[in-house]
Image (spheres, grey):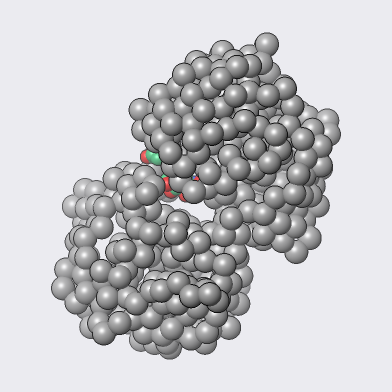
Amino acid sequence: MDKLIIQGGVPLNGRIRVSGSKNAALPILMASILVDEPITFTNVPRLRDIFTTLKLLNILGCVSTFEDDCVRVESCDLKHEAPYELVKTMRASVLCLGPLLARLGRAKVSLPGGCAIGARPVDMHLTAFERMGATFDLDSGNIMGTCEHGLTGAHIQFPFPTVGGTENVLMGAALARGETILENAAREPEITDLANFLNACGARITGQGTSIIRVQGVDRLTGCAYRIMPDRIEAGTYLAAAAITDGELVLEDCPFHELDAVVTKMREMGVWINEREDGVVARRGTELVGVDVMTMPFPGFPTDMQAQIMALMTMARGSSVIEETIFENRFMHVQELVRLGAKIRLSGRTAMVRGVESLKGAPVMASDLRASASLVVAALAARGETEVLRIYHLDRGYEGIEKKLTNVGARIRRVPE
Ligand code: UD1
């Protein structure tokens, strides 16, 4: 297992190119199961979760190649079983459920276990597919889904705008018989990207990006070439890194408009962020000041940026409050940030951060993907040396992070633990 060693206190200056979005690429790659012709994807980030997805697709009968940022996939001889070994390493594996049900009329997908940031059940996915005619059994930890005559369009009302649930059902509905209406659908840009991809393959989806999505099922989907959207969370993480180190970064291919809630909060904190022709520029204004943040479904403040903005708050004047409303246990970075000298008090789903003058390097442990990112952000500003242990989480979501940071002046290296 690798660790990162970071000598903090160096302002970051220069340009970083934002990679393709992990959370868009995962469902979109999974949607290849629905298509019976070759597809070419570009701007695919080279990340652990993407390799896991391609491995899973391979087991399910999709042949793929991955060169540079380009993935070619063709579904050949589809199988219906997603094994536990893969599902347990990546919860998003459950996104093959909709495509398999739609294409084969059956699916056996291992039930994703609990994960570090909360229980994260898939009940809303299953209830929606039941409305579309599927039945489910749980057998030895596997969800066994069947719909002998394929999925049928239905009116689905999500009790909560679940991102994965919306994506799963959208994929199933693309090949279902008749019309599906998704109400209280999640509005995340990654869902819009998935819908746009499906439409490029011949699907008939409207309303993506709003809370009511309509899908007219079609008989088949055809191949196309598609560029995955850039990663708004990776971009937001580098905005935080620019501000906390008092440097100046220009982010190329930055999805500025999808970052509205993050940019608004950071500007409130005193970060200067602007869109230019050559990218999005970020630097600290005069000083950082505390703000209050509540995580919400899109277009609200993303839970996936909660840990990173908390890192920034640790060095902002005054107090900040974060309320985490999406996941019940997403504060594992708090104790580690405290090890770097941050002053944070936790009370249920609320964290109160009191800004300090400076952080000081220490060994810290990464517990999940975004928690790891927040530790790197904090370490970049902390005086002295920070060791971030267990960075395999980071490799799930940040393409070439140490290379990108080194290029803008960070003193960071990866060593085997
Ligand atoms: C996706 C993102 C993740 C992000 C999250 C919220 C991917 C691969 N992952 O995760 O990075 O943090 O959206 O923006 O895109 N829930 C249920 N039952 C369900 C489904 C969800 O109770 O059937 C709960 C979850 O436990 C969680 C909340 O709803 O508390 C939100 O989950 P959801 O929006 O589905 O997140 P994911 O798709 O898992």
Report the label total. 0
**Rendered position, 40 above or below 283:** above
Residue 33 visible in the displayed image: no
**Residue 226's spot in the image, x, y percent?**
70, 50
**Rendered position, 150 above or below 50:** above
Quadrant housing the N terminus: bottom right
* Residue at the image position 41 percent from the left and 77 percent from the top: 282
Q: Quadrant of residue 27?
A: top right
Is 92 situated left or right of 264 in this image? right
**Rendered position, 229 above or below 26:** below
**Rendered position, 212 above or below 127:** below
**Residue 68's spot in the image, x, y percent?**
75, 64
**Residue 338's spot in the image, x, y percent?**
28, 69
Q: Nearer the viewer, residue 207 or 77?
A: 207
Residue 54 visible in the displayed image: yes
Quadrant housing the C terminus: bottom right
* Residue at the image position 43 percent from the left and 39 percent from the top: 210
Is 59 situated left or right of 237 in this image? right
**Residue 36's spot in the image, x, y percent?**
79, 33
* Residue at the image position 71 percent from the left and 38 percent from the top: 201
* Residue at the image position 22 percent from the left and 65 percent from the top: 291
- Residue lying at the far right in this picture: please name it: 76
